[in-house]
Amino acid sequence: MKIKNMLIDTHSHLNFSDFEEDRNEVIKRCFENKVSMINIGTNFETSKKAIEIAQQYQGKAWAAIGLHPINLDTGLIKIKNQKSKCKNWEDLTEDKFNYQKYKELSKNQRVVAIGEVGLDYYWKPKTTKKKEIFKKKQKDLLFQELKLASELNLPVIFHCRMAHQDLIEILLSQKYLSFKKRRKGVMHGFVGKKEELEAYLKMGFYIGFNGIIFKNIEGINFIENIKITPLDKILIESDCPFLMPPVFTKSAIKPGRNEPASIRFIAENIADIKRVSVEKVINITTQNAKQLFNI
């Protein structure tokens, strides 16, 4: 079902336990603000929950499924929440990627992407040898999920933290290029340098911007990145419950918890940087989302 005149939060986590007590209230608030959303899976349980929400709110909510790199239990780093003690389903780790299991899940018509998947080197082993094994396990996982996306002809939502050079290398590799269907996707919550941004744009990827653009991160120029990125390659996202824009603080239902409704502030900031109207940013980024995710 196609939608009209609605801003799309292309990366939210209303499927996380942070919203368990008042999820319907938050979603109602989104719709009142003309914001629809794609909820993103980080493991099998959150992927299932994203689909459940999408089925409940058809036409205004969609789902992406995948195993996040930090939800892969490599056995090489200490996992904060062990399975036996885990209270939140988004923290559950998986020993390996069950290709067939995720493939079956993806057959649901509300699934519009594989994600979020990628590389995350923020938490890593200390020794060189273990680091190499750790990175290889994440890369092997990513290739499996890229293969699934290719088989299903679905776009990919990439997560990348402190690993852009490795991700770019993978996306330019002969192994990846051998996939019949590829290079449809978005670099979620992009935090990187100009050269890395340009590499992704050259490959045809969309760039996702969220509340992190309001932070000061050494070596990262968000204003310049937004200026460089063509408007027809930008997606807007909340990454809720994380990364709340400062101006949304007083509007939040719960202190410190971000919501999809906050993405209008992202649109306003992008409009200000690009010196165009907010309406233009909303219209083009919404069209971008519809085109990429076929909604």
Image (cartoon, rainbow, N blue to C red):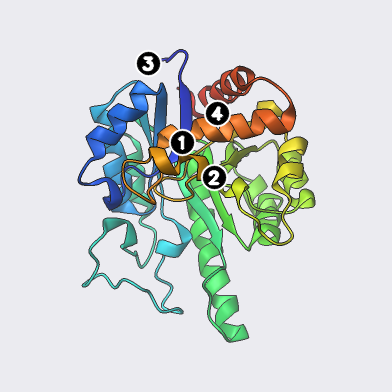
Q: Is residue 244 left or right of residue 166?
A: left
Which of labels 3 and 1 is toward the front?
A: 1
Could you say where residue 175 lies in the image, as x and y percent from the top left? 64, 53
**First reached walking from the N terminus: tag 2 or tag 1:** 2
Asked if the residue under mark 4 is in contact with the one under mark 3, i.e. CB atoms within 8 Å, the reply is no
Residue nearest the viewer, comparing 4 with 134: 4
- Per the image, the residue denoted by label 2 is 211
Nearest to viewer (mark 4 / mark 1): 1
Q: In terms of image quadrants, where is residue 68? A: bottom left
Q: Residue 153: in sight, yes or no? A: no
The residue nearer to you, when weighing 60 against 63, is: 60
Q: Residues within 10 Å of mark 1 (few under 14, many from 20)?
A: many
Q: Position of residue 138 (x, y in %)?
A: 52, 64
Amino acid type shown at disc 1:
Ser
Query: Nearest the camera: 174 or 263?
Result: 263
Spatial distance from mark 4 to mark 2, Cα to Cα? 21 Å
Contact between marks 2 and 1 (CB within 8 A): the answer is: yes
